Each structure stands twice: as C-alpha cells, then as structure tokens.
Image (tube, helix red, strand yellow):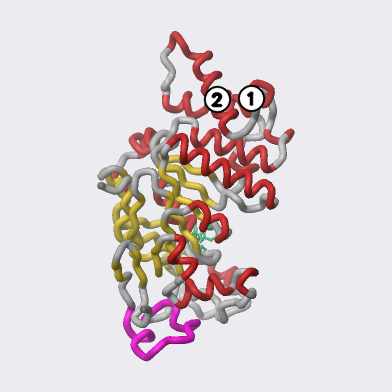
Amino acid sequence: MNPLLEVKDLIVSFQENETENKNKNKNEDKNEDKNETVTAVSCLSFSIREKETLALVGETGCGKSVVAHAIMRLLPPESRVKGAIEFRGKNLLEMSEKEMAKFRGKEISIIFQNPSLALNPVYSIGHQLAEPFRIHGQEKKKEKGNTTLSKVSGALKRVGFSNPHEYMGYYPSWCSGGMNQRFLIAASTMLDPALLIADEPSKGLDRDRVSELENELKNLKEKNENALLLISHDLGFVRRLADRVAVMYAGEIIEIAGPSSLFESPRHPYTRGLLNSLPENGFVPIPGSSPPLSNPPAGCRFHPRCRIKEKRCMQEHPELKESNGSAVRCFLCP
Ligand SMILES: Nc1ncnc2c1ncn2[C@@H]1O[C@H](COP(=O)(O)OP(=O)(O)OP(=O)(O)O)[C@@H](O)[C@H]1O
Ligand code: NI
C-alpha cells in the first residue's frame, strides 16, 4: 500500500541573524561567526500509512515541531526547506500557497501545543468551530446555517460535550485549559482530515485530562479512521497510542520501531538512555546534553554522550539502517 505521507530527505535550516547571535553569545565567545546556520532537521525520511499513528519523540529542541510545521507549510519565512513532503504522491513543498490553503484543515490538520494561543479570545467557540467550513466553502447556499450548526454540534459531542449548543456561545476565557483543548481537537477534526498532527497535545494538562485526551484521540481514530502524527514527551501516552515510534536526536531519526519492541528492547543507546530516564526506570539521566544544531559533532551525533562508542563512531556518520520494518542509526547496535 502506498503511504499517505512520505517525507523524503527533509532538511530545514534557519539563518540566525547578527543581532540575535550577539545577544545569545553575549556572555560566551565574542569572536564567533556573525551569521550562523542552524540545521534543525537533517535529511529526515519517514512515512505514515493511511490510518496509522506514528509518534515522534526526543528531547526538547531535537526538531519535532519543525517537522510538524514543515508538513503544514507553516514555517517562518527565514527558514530554508529542502527535500520532499509527499501527501498521496503530491509534493506539498511544490504547491502554491493557494493550493496549500485548500489542504490545510481539510486533508491535513494540526492541534497546536498551546490551546489558549490557538483560540481567538474575541470569538465564541461556535464561531471558531464553524471556521473550517467558511474557509473551505463547503456549504451549499440553501442548507448553509443549519448544516454547519449540526456539524459543529456533532463535533462537540464527539469530544465529550453532552449539551453542545450551550458551549457554542461560550468564549475561550470562560473555559478551562482542558475544555479549550477539546474545542481545538473538535476544530482540527471538523472536516475529517486524512492526517491529524498533534504537537504535544498533553502538555500542561493534569493527569485526568491526559487520560481524557488519550481516550478522545483513540475514539477519533476509531471513528474517523484518520492517520495521526503524535508528537509527545509523554512516553506512556505514546506507548499506548502509537503503531510505530520514531526517535529523533539532534535533527535526525535514530531509531524507528513498533512500540512494544521499542519500549521492551530498545536498540540505539540514545533510546535506551531515554527510557532509563523515565521515573519508573529509575530516573537515570543521559550524561551531557544535545549538541548545538549550528555545529553538530562529526561522526555519529550521539557519540559524545555514548557509553559504547568506538573510534569509527567519532569519524563516520551512520546511516539509518532498515530491517524488518524497524530501523536504527548506529554502527554497534544489534
Ligand atoms: N524560527 C526559528 N529560527 C531559528 N531557529 C529555530 C526556529 N524555529 C526552531 N528553531 C530551532 O530548531 C530547533 C528545533 O526546534 P523544535 O521546536 O522543532 O524542537 P522540538 O523538538 O519541538 O522541542 P520541544 O520538545 O521543546 O517542543 C531548535 O534548536 C530551535 O532553536
Ligand atoms: Ni516542539
């Protein structure tokens, strides 16, 4: 079966300007280059099948949100993007802004990290939930109002609001973070996109809300049969929801595997380190920190923190090697 989304050799870099650099390096090396290129994502390739949930995990700053924003074509103008992002065989990176606007929300949709920033405080929930219909002009004139209303109310019911008409008149500031999160999920899934991207959907929610969210995402998947790109720090959440997990380190994928093999028998030393740093595994942190993306180390990017490294790891850059549906970027992994 052809993949729904195929990311091929994606490279995203940012040119950091002089003033930003000066501020950043104020207390550091003053002689550093004035213009730095930060390569947030390096030669990244992965695919998502129809209806599949692929999770993207890795430490903060490894490039997860940049990947999500590249797929949505929402990166800032100072970014440079290379490679291809094919959705049903069509390269999103080659589409005009007008064509892309037709895709957003309808074919591919995103739930942003921060619900209070993603919702507009001056419009009611009902108005904002009807937005996708207005943008995509899906309403036939005759049936306009009513159909939209019933679709909005259906979407609210789906995310657990039993009396949706009441909530349509609410404003975001009247609601809790958890409620706003559910409104956003309803808005993002209103047009039944084939691919839903959820960037840290559980961030900032308490434990009850996280399990509610987990159920909602599960339900959505079952009902709508959409594919999901799930970005999360919450590995428990990932383990329960994902069909496959891709682990990123310093802008690269270093391991891809099914959740049971990844969590039970991780292969890459970084994946093992990530799992050992979980509270239930004894909170053992990985020594050191991620390398600067403006100047990553030669050889394997993880070698400065790796306990099993050999000479070769410091000199050669390992490829992501695939076998039996999983893949690992390491010379020494089993
Ligand atoms: N507009 C930008 N200009 C310059 N650098 C950027 C820009 N956006 C992202 N970056 C850099 O790209 C790198 C990856 O950022 P990204 O937000 O994708 O990380 P992340 O994996 O999503 O982290 P987190 O888990 O904290 O959300 C970071 O080093 C960040 O500084
Ligand atoms: Ni992020």
Magenta highlight on residue 304: yes
Q: Magenta region: which residues? A: 299-317
Q: Position of residue 162 (x, y in %)?
A: 65, 27
Separation of disc 1 and disc 2 at Cα?
8 Å
Q: Which residue is farthest right?
A: 174
Q: Are marks 1 and 2 in contact (CB under 8 Å)?
A: yes
Is 270 displayed left or right of 97 in the figure?
Answer: right
Quadrant position of residue 237? bottom right
Which residue is pictured at 53% across the width and 75% down the height?
Answer: 273
- What amino acid type should be assigned to the residue bearing mark 2? Gly
Image vertical order of residue 132 relative to residue 2, above or below: above
Marking on residue 154:
2
Three-letter amino acid code at disc 1? Pro
Q: Which residue is mark 1?
A: 164
Q: Nearer the viewer, residue 233 or 243?
A: 243
Q: Is residue 7 left or right of residue 18?
A: left
The dot on residue 188 is none
